[in-house]
Image: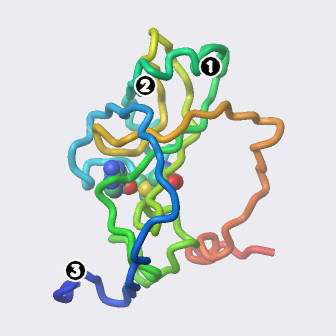
Amino acid sequence: MPNDPHGLREGEVSVSLPESTDASLYFIGRIRTPWTERKQCPKNARQSRESGAICTVEVDPRWAQALAGVETCSHLILLYWMDKARRDLVIQRPGHYDTGRATFALRSPVRPNPIALAVVELRKVEGTRLEVDGVDCLDGTPLLDIKPYFASTDAIPDAQVGWHADRNGIKTP
Ligand SMILES: C[S@@+](CC[C@H](N)C(=O)[O-])C[C@H]1O[C@@H](n2cnc3c(N)ncnc32)[C@H](O)[C@@H]1O
């Protein structure tokens, strides 16, 4: 599909961004992965796990004490900053979709605050380096936060994304 002069795909809509930001944040580390180009990157945590790639989270040593107890967790929630994503689209059409979709109904990295999340399996901890299975980002992607994944409160096995199920021809209640 041809792009227009502003780099939009057909059906995409951009808005002007606010003149200033409302908050600042600290990058607490970097995520090391085998992927240096978006087209190589898994699209989600499941594809990442299926790729067999073990990735490394390098936490800034400043935060070493904040990692105590993390080694006891089997799974973690990682929040990371998709630093190569544009931030002004309200309707977007990821390459693998045939129609535009609203930003907040998608897991695309393109969003006003390009924060991504993944539930990863923690394989190994060596000081401030964590080996994990299940991230879907480019090598060097900034890390924002690490939280324990509580299956007891975070898992909602019957959760639905209606439009996605319908897209695949599956009827939702
Ligand atoms: C669909 S997003 C999902 C991210 C996260 N799992 C989530 O659900 O919030 C994953 C895609 O973001 C893109 N991506 C990865 N790292 C990026 C980065 N640092 N900046 C911009 N885009 C990135 C790649 O195309 C990758 O396939």
Up the image or down, 142 lies above or below 11; here it is above
Up the image or down, 69 lies above or below 148; here it is above
Residue located 59% across and 71% down the image:
164
Direction from residue 117 to residue 16 in the image, left or right: left
Mark 3 is surrounded, within 10 Å at the Cα level, by few (under 14), some (14 to 19) or many (20 or more) other residues, namely: few
Direction from residue 59 to residue 159 in the image, left or right: right
- Say whether disc 3 or disc 1 marks the residue closer to the N-terminus: 3
Q: Amino acid at mark 3?
A: Gly
Residue located 41% across and 45% down the image:
136
The residue to which callout 1 is attached is 70
The residue to which callout 2 is attached is 59
Furthest residue to the top?
Answer: 126
- Say whether disc 2 or disc 3 marks the residue closer to the N-terminus: 3
Residue 81 spot, x, y in % from top left: 42, 49
- Distance from label 2 to label 3 (Cα)? 34 Å
Secondary structure of the residue carrying numbered label 2 = strand
- Say whether disc 2 or disc 1 marks the residue closer to the N-terminus: 2
The residue to which callout 3 is attached is 7
Secondary structure of the residue carrying numbered label 1 = helix
Residue located 32% across and 31% down the image:
32
Say if mark 2 contacts mark 1, CB within 8 Å. no
Residue 1 spot, x, y in % from top left: 23, 84
